[in-house]
Each structure stands twice: as C-alpha cells, then as structure tokens.
Image: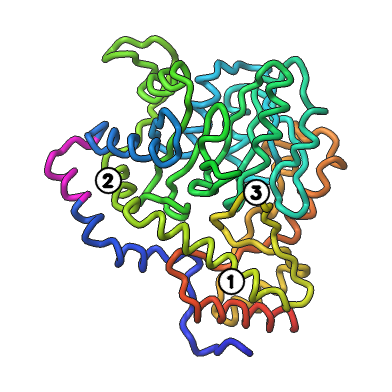
Amino acid sequence: MNAPETLPPLQFIDLKTQYSALRETINARIQRVLDHGQYIMGPEVKELEDKLAAYTGAKHCVTVSSGTEALLIALMALGLKAGDEVITTPFTFAATAEMIVLLGCKPVFVDIEPDTCNIDASLIEAKITPRTKAIMPVGLYGQCADMDEINTIAARHGNIPVIEDAAQSFGATYKGRKSCNLSTIGCTSFFPSKPLGCYGDGGAMFTNDDTIAQACREIRVHGQSKRYTHTRVGVGGRMDTLQCAVVLGKLERFEWEIEQRLALGERYAALLTDVPGLRRLAVRADRDCVWAQYTVFVPQRARVQAALTALGVPTAVHYPIPLHKQPAYAMHAGDAALLRHSERAGELVMSLPMSADLAEDQQWRVVDALAEAVRQ
C-alpha cells in the first residue's frame, strides 16, 4: 500500500495537462485578440459575459479584473458606506473581509458549520442589527452555503442584499440552481487555480437586477456612464480581453471538468473511508461540491504534511488562521468564543491534490501516501 518514493512529485493543481488538452483552442483565442488589438473591452469581453450569464441562468454578467474586485464593486453598487455592517464568515480568504473594511464598513463574523466549513445560517439572524446592510456567505471549497435559508432571513429583515462569494464554487449547483445565480449578487474569481480560471487575474459578477448591473458596469470603468461622464465614484476594474479569451477557451470543456471534479470527489471519499483518524468534509444532499480544494480534517496536520512531502505528495492549508485572529481584522472579532468551529477548522483542514486531469492512479497514490503518513 505504500506510495513509491521514487515517483516524481505530483502537482497540487495540474494546469499544464489542462493547457495541453486545450492548447489549440486557447492559442487560437489569444491569437485572435493579438490580431484585432482591442486589449481593453474587446469583443471577447461581451462574448464571455453572454456565455457566463447563459451558463448560470443569471440575467446579467459583468466581468471584472479579479474576484476581489468583484466583491468591492458589489458592495459599492449596493451603496454601502462607512459604519455599515456586513455579516460574513471568518473562515475564508482575506479578500472577503478585506473589501468590507476597505469601504469603512464593519465585518460581523458568524461561525461555520463544523462539517462543511460554510457559514452557519442558523446563527445569522442573531447578528442582524439596524446597521446590517449586506450578508456575504462564501461557497468554501466549492460547495454553496445554505443560500435559501440565508435569503429567507435577509427577506425577513427588510430584504437585506445577499452577496454570494462564489470564488471557489463557480460551476456548483444548489437545489438544482447554479452558483452565482442564488442571491442579489454573485461574485466569482478566475484566478488560475479556480475551477474556471484564466492565466492571470479575472473575475465576474452576476445579478438579475438591472439597476445593480448598470451600477457594476459603471463602477468598473471609473464610474463612467459614457466616456468622460462620471456618474459615480468607481475603480479601474475591467477584465483584460486576453484573459477573457483564455476563459472562453476553457469554457469549451468546462462541463466535462465539473463532471470530473465531482467524480474525483466521490472517489476520494470512497478511498479515504478506511484511513484512520481522518474526517472528510460533508456535502449536503441538496447540493454538490466542485472541489476547488479537496479538503479533509487531519489531526497532527504538520506531521502528516511533512510525511506527505517526503513521499512526493503536495498539500496546502485553506486556511490556517481565521480572519478574526488576523492582526488586520482582530478588532472586529467580537466574542471569539462564538467562533470556535472556525478556530478548530483552522487547526485541522488540509487540502489534497485536485484538478480535473488528476488520473486515477495518481489519486490512489495520494491516498496510499496519506494512509502511510497517518499511520506513522
């Protein structure tokens, strides 16, 4: 059962194999941009927006320069101002709270479900105050949060806008509906390691609200409603035409990649069943997980990671320190005792190699090495 130590190291995310499969398509897409020379807001931008809107079922898609910028523009489009509160999770990448604080708003942290690591919807209502102007759940690791319950709570308190941070869950479904079309605004990232990634930074926003969509389009071009007419304060948040071309190329096999991710997740779950001391992330029956990171809970994580590294198996931790424990956001921690599941998850989570092109024999190798590392 031991993984052979003579084998070359595995890739944590295998973008090289993906590119090899899509080389002709991506190269042709890039060459088309080089030929027409419209590097900013070229025709590929609208083409991608139309295709992504159709994919999610949302009325509008607005591409932007990154997933982080998508969150910022979403908050700006909703008119949030200094002193407003946004309810979110502390167990996420810093960008989620970063954009809230950047606008002078206050992140209000709610603990996670210990088995999914997504925000615990049952705890949100108790945190709502007259200053609550948005709720921002995160689809961590590729699984949507309980969006219907969150939307119901938001509606009960005056239709508070809900911003889905879907940087990791694009392509996932929740009760038969696509991530990014589950709330007021959906935001995603095309960072290269995401389920749908470009070759740099990029992101997109989705909404069914015409007014919000127009605000997002204006904000991303310095608040312009037309050239040199600045109707609002904005940012330089456009997605480059070349990056849109890359995503268009990758869209051609994206459905296949999602199917592969789902199958790989199921195989990991089956293979890891007998690994002692290991706990798998739960996936709710009414949704799926596209496994932006295939994550497990591992006691004595540092020791296990070191053993896996010696066996040529890369791992990562998403995320070791919850935001309420980070120096930049500690002032917003509130009662840390109420965030104990987030803190415990930070001590245990570990992500294994995952990408659509991960071969079955490579997956066996990961599991064999993990079993050996745990036994040690």
Labels 1 and 2 touching (C-beta < 8 A) = no
Residue at image location 67% in from the left, 55% down from the top: 283
Q: Secondary structure at mark 3?
A: loop
Q: Judge the density around disc 3: few (<14), some (14-19), many (≥20) Cα neighbours within 10 Å.
A: few
C-alpha distance separating marks 3 and 1? 19 Å
Name the mark on residue 267.
Answer: 1
Give the residue drawn at x 59%, y 62%: 294
**Residue 33 counted in the magenta span:** yes
Determine whether label 3 and label 1 are within 8 Å by CB: no
Q: Which residue is mark 3?
A: 286
Q: Which residue is mark 2?
A: 245
Q: Is residue 325 left or right of residue 94?
A: right
Dot 2 falls on a residue whose secondary structure is helix
CA distance separating discs 2 and 3: 34 Å
Q: Which mark sits nearer the N-terminus, 1 or 2?
A: 2
Q: Classify residue 359 as left or right of residue 323.
A: left
Residue 157 locus on image (x, y percent): 73, 19
Could you say where residue 80 lies in the image, as x and y percent from the top left?
Answer: 59, 18
Residue 373, image x, y percentages: 69, 80
Q: Position of residue 34 (x, y in %)?
A: 16, 45
Describe the element under mark 1 as helix, strand or loop: helix
